[in-house]
Amino acid sequence: VPHGIERPEPSEPSGALLALLLALYEDDVRAVVAEGGLIDFQSALESPFCYVPFDAVIPGAIAVGDIPGLLLGLSKSSVRLIAPVDGQNRATTRPMQIATYAPSRRAFDADTLQIDPEPPTPAALVRWLRSATLPPGQQ
């Protein structure tokens, strides 16, 4: 960063990525909430400036698939992505989210993949988790 310019904050997508990976490898996970994760690793390659911490980068992962592809493996669960950011730690726009996750959306049942631009209220999140994890009629 040039002198006299404030350095942007790095993103913190590790927790969101860990939640998605855990759900991928654990068969009994029925709902996943991932807040502040990367929209995709591809966005980190779109600029010479990258604000993704090293602990969120999985060596060789982009050659195998990206986060939208990872979501395809979670189509049996309910997934809620909250405020995803790009590789420069900027909030993503709704059109960018729709375009990036279009293939993933087709693999999910209606309303089981949600993308929120901002964090929901705690009460709204609890209602969503209940509806996502309890059998119909027990909510």
Image (cartoon, rainbow, N blue to C red):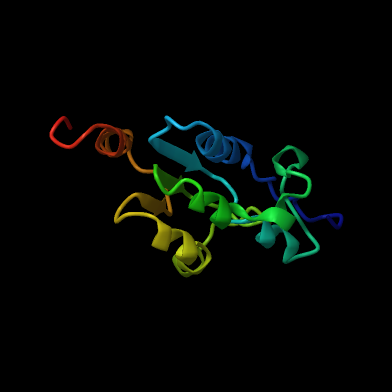
Q: Is 3 left, or right, of 126 in this rendering?
A: right
Q: Position of residue 61 (x, y in %)?
A: 72, 49
Label tally: 0
Q: Give the residue furthest to the left.
A: 137
The answer to which of 26 and 40 lies nearer the viewer is 26
Q: Is 17 left, or right, of 83 in this rendering?
A: right
Q: Position of residue 73 (x, y in %)?
A: 51, 48
Q: Is 64 left, or right, of 91 in this rendering?
A: right
Q: Position of residue 17 (x, y in %)?
A: 59, 41
Residue at 68%, 46% (x, y): give it.
Answer: 9
Residue at 70%, 41% (x, y): give it.
Answer: 56
Q: Give the residue furthest to the right.
A: 3
Residue at 47%, 59% (x, y): give it.
Answer: 104
Which corner quadrant of the image does residue 47 belong to? bottom right
Q: Position of residue 35 (x, y in %)?
A: 50, 42
Residue at 41%, 53% (x, y): give it.
Answer: 115
Q: Is 121 left, or right, of 94 in this rendering?
A: left
> The C terminus lies in which quarter of the figure?
top left
Camera sees residue 39: no
> The N terminus lies in which quarter of the figure?
bottom right
Asked if residue 29 is positioned above or below residue 120 in the image, the reply reads above
Camera sees residue 53: yes
